[in-house]
Image: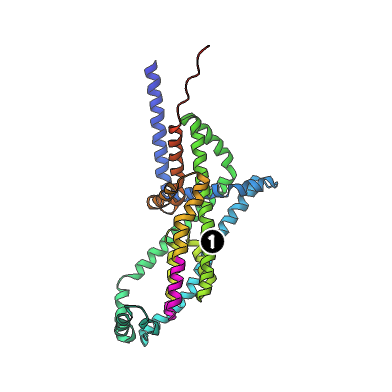
């Protein structure tokens, strides 16, 4: 009888494991959307609770917050796309001129430290002469840029599908999360005992703190560097500051933006301003990424500085962009298990007197 019961238990566990694996395999293309929806829901959950306290229905709060998150995500992307389209017109015009009459050597090329003469010579040989410029463009076109453009378009469509499913999942997360949370708490108690709920809370706090840290530090970087762009005389300083704040959540994202800003200053022959902007921006980004952000996240999660840093960069390397949030959550759960196991054992109470 006992052997039959053990076989039934083993069969149930095996069946559940198979069903879970099959479900994950079916959902694998949409797992990023589910993960992003979970991260966004956890980060903005206090706003949902505030709307409920103000008398809004659960469905109304879910619709309102989903629309707000969608606008905050899609709006900046549309602004960047419009600005990139405008700059693309300039690029097309420049390429046309390059084919017809060549491109004269700008004055700033000779002012480039150490490499100015070499770059100017190369420019005269390959870009200033129309025939050489046509040959250079022909080599570039032979690299199958049409195929690259198609791949880029396909990737953009895939990202839009992920975004659509993220927002759809986010709506249901806002609406049904209390029920899901209660069911998850019951299952965690059955599987892991009282510590299961504690581990879940540590992971939730870590995700929320990571999102808040990335957003707040990103906004601060965008404001500081936006002011620096304006002082240095960069064209469109507000747009560059906005792009810095948006990409500051990604390692090296802010660096890429301020390098482009410095390059625009070099093109305008403003070498001193470019160097000063580069030094100032490098200091701001380095301090924000390696000190302010880990300290801000660690203060909320009680994670040591090193583990926050390892969670952010290790998660990014392993899981991609979503790993920025998943990594610290996993580290928080691991540290919680470590602290739970390191607690001194409670001595047995004395029996009688």
Q: Is residue 269 above or below residue 208?
A: below
Which residue in the structure is indicated by mark 1? 220
Q: Residue 72: percent from the left, percent from the top?
A: 56, 59
Counting from the top left corner in percent of width and height, residue 47 is at 62, 49
- Name the quarter where the N terminus is drawn: top left
As drawn, the residue found furthest toward the right would be 55
Q: Position of residue 331 (x, y in %)?
A: 43, 44
Quarter residue 121 falls in: bottom left
**Vertical side of 335 occupied by 209: above or below:** below
Of the pair 146 and 70, the residue shown nearer to us:
70
Decide: is 74 above or below 342: below
Q: How is the image coloured?
A: rainbow
Q: Nearer the viewer, residue 198 or 300?
A: 300
Residue 345: percent from left, percent from top: 45, 26
Does residue 24 show up?
yes
* Element at label 1: helix
Q: Is residue 284 magenta?
A: no
In the foreground, 47 or 95:
47
List the single residue furthest toward the front. 353
Question: Which residue is pictured at 49% across the width and 32% down the height?
Answer: 195
Span colored in magenta: 266-281
Q: Quadrant of residue 103?
A: bottom left
What predominant SS class does the magenta segment belong to?
helix
Measuring 46% from the left and 33% from the top, which residue is drawn there?
340
Disc 1 crowd, CA 10 A, few/some/many (<14, 14-19, 20+) = some
Residue 30 seen by the camera: no
- Count of marks, rendered view: 1
């Amino acid at each position: 009888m006992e052997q039959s019961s053990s076989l039934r238990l083993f069969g149930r566990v095996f069946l559940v494991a198979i069903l879970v694996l099959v479900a994950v395999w079916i959902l694998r293309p949409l797992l990023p959307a589910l993960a992003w929806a979970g991260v966004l829901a956890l980060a903005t959950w206090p706003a949902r609770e505030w709307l409920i306290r103000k008398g809004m229905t659960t469905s109304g709060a879910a619709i309102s917050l989903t629309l707000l998150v969608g606008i905050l995500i899609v709006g900046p992307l549309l602004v960047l796309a419009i600005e990139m389209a405008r700059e693309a017109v300039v690029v097309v015009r420049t390429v046309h001129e390059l084919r017809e009459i060549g491109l004269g050597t700008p004055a700033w090329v000779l002012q480039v430290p150490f490499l100015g003469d070499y770059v100017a010579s190369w420019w005269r040989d390959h870009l200033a002469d129309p025939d050489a410029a046509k040959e250079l463009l022909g080599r570039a076109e032979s690299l199958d840029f049409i195929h690259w453009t198609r791949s880029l378009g396909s990737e953009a469509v895939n990202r839009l599908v992920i975004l659509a499913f993220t927002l759809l999942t986010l709506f249901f997360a806002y609406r049904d999360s209390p029920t899901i949370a209660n069911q998850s708490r019951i299952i965690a108690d059955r599987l892991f005992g009282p510590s299961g709920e504690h581990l879940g809370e540590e992971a939730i706090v870590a995700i929320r703190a990571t999102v808040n840290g990335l957003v707040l530090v990103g906004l601060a970087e965008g404001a500081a560097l936006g002011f620096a762009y304006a002082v240095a005389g960069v064209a469109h300083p507000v747009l560059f500051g906005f792009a810095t704040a948006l990409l500051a959540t990604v390692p090296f994202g802010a660096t890429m933006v301020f390098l482009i800003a410095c390059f625009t200053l070099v093109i305008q022959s403003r070498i001193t301003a470019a160097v000063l902007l580069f030094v100032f921006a490098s200091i701001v980004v380095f301090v924000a990424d390696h000190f302010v952000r880990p300290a801000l996240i660690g203060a909320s999660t009680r994670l040591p500085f090193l583990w926050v840093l390892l969670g952010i960069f290790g998660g990014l390397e392993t899981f991609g962009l979503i790993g920025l949030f998943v990594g610290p959550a996993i580290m928080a759960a691991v540290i919680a298990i470590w602290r739970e196991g390191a607690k001194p054992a409670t001595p047995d109470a004395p029996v009688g007197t």
